[in-house]
Image (cartoon, rainbow, N blue to C red):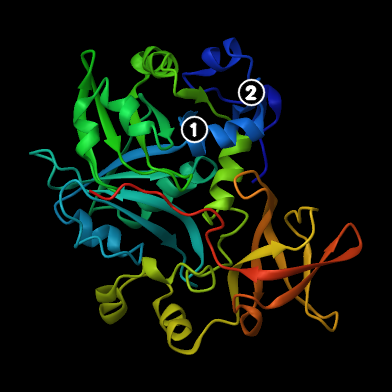
Amino acid sequence: MPDTAAGALKTTPLDGLHRSLGAKMVPFAGYSMPVSYPLGVLKEHLQTRTEAGLFDVSHMGQAELAGEDVTDALETLVPGDLKALEPGQIRYTVLLNNDGGIIDDLMVTRPAEPGMEDILYLVVNAACKDADFAHITEKLAGRATLTRHESSALLALQGPKAAVVLARFIPEAAAMGFMTSRTATWEGSSVRLFRSGYTGEDGYEISIPVDAAEHFARTILDQTEVQPIGLGARDSLRLEAGLCLYGSDIDTNTTPVEASLTWVIGKRRRADGGFPGVDKILAQIADGASRKRVGVQPLGRAPARAHTEIQDGAGNMIGEITSGGFGPSVNAPVAMGYVAAQFAKVGTPLTLIVRGQPMPAEVAKLPFAPHRYFKS
């Protein structure tokens, strides 16, 4: 997504903390964000895989959607089975356009607290949040009201030590299952916890009032298991985990079936329909899509970056890399991209054109690094 000119960049509530920690700041989604700290991207990545890392994700869009039939209303815009959400559960889904293309991917939470039965909590991507919220507001006018949570920061604590660390301050966090949410209190501030994240590791996202965010972040960073982590490691972590980046791996020209996200379309929704692009999407489920997102394993040491051409053995272009780089956990280059469906089988040989030179590769099973989400 295009970055805003440096002079007009927004900042998160933790901007001063990042700078005090020596972060290298870069423009991202209209914000000044830390890409790395003195530890460096590779060590930040491995820190998150082995212990715990703290990420500032306050640039993401947080909102509440309220209405008497809020679940039915939002199901007109997404293919997920939101009616099946139990109180306290989270669901990953996608906003769709009328052609079945992905406007954005998002997390939807049904709060467990009494009095919130007619509310859904939404977290959307930073670069898309203004357009997403405008789209939802327009499409659901008269059925649901969207309220943005501008007064809340959002942090992510990720890694195998995340639960141990967070439970020192919020004991209730330890018993939470993956993709569940609850509220808690920390030093007099009400916080909302989500046991989810964007790394493939166990961990939490923590929505906390802006005026408490820096103190909370410093408290967590004071723990010996935790280091601050920037956008560089966030990207390599999610790539190893096979997770999509909106604007790179998925966009308005990509359907969930093409993106290998068919699992987001609930069984009931496939039967009942009622979401944008339903005819095209159901046809692709039945007959197959012409292209598919796959993992790509370069067989050399050179990484294949986004927009690298993918060819078959005869030199015909069959696709393109959408995300690629070096995977520190697997000590090898890793990538994802789209190929014509007949080349999507794991193990299929490919040729990548890297800086004008052919390089051998093959279709790889995703994820490259195993998911280690906590299951209660």
Disc 2: CA contacts within 10 A as few (<14), some (14-19) or many (>=20)? some
Q: CA distance from mark 2 to mark 1?
A: 23 Å
Disc 1: CA contacts within 10 A as few (<14), some (14-19) or many (>=20)? many
* Label drawn at residue 39: 2
The residue at the far right in this view is 356
Which residue is nearer to you in this view: 148 or 113?
113
Q: Nearer the viewer, mark 2 or mark 1?
A: 2
Q: Give the vertical position of 94 relative to 155 (above or below).
A: below
Residue at 76% over, 56% down: 304
Looking at the picture, how far across and down is residue 272, in whole percent?
Answer: 25, 79
Residue at 26% over, 26% down: 167
Q: Which residue is mark 1?
A: 59
Q: Quadrant of residue 336?
A: bottom right
Looking at the picture, how far across and down is residue 157, in whole percent?
Answer: 41, 31
Question: Which amino acid type corresponds to the residue marked 2 in the rendered image?
Answer: Leu
Q: How many marks?
A: 2
Mark 2 lies on a secondary structure that is: loop
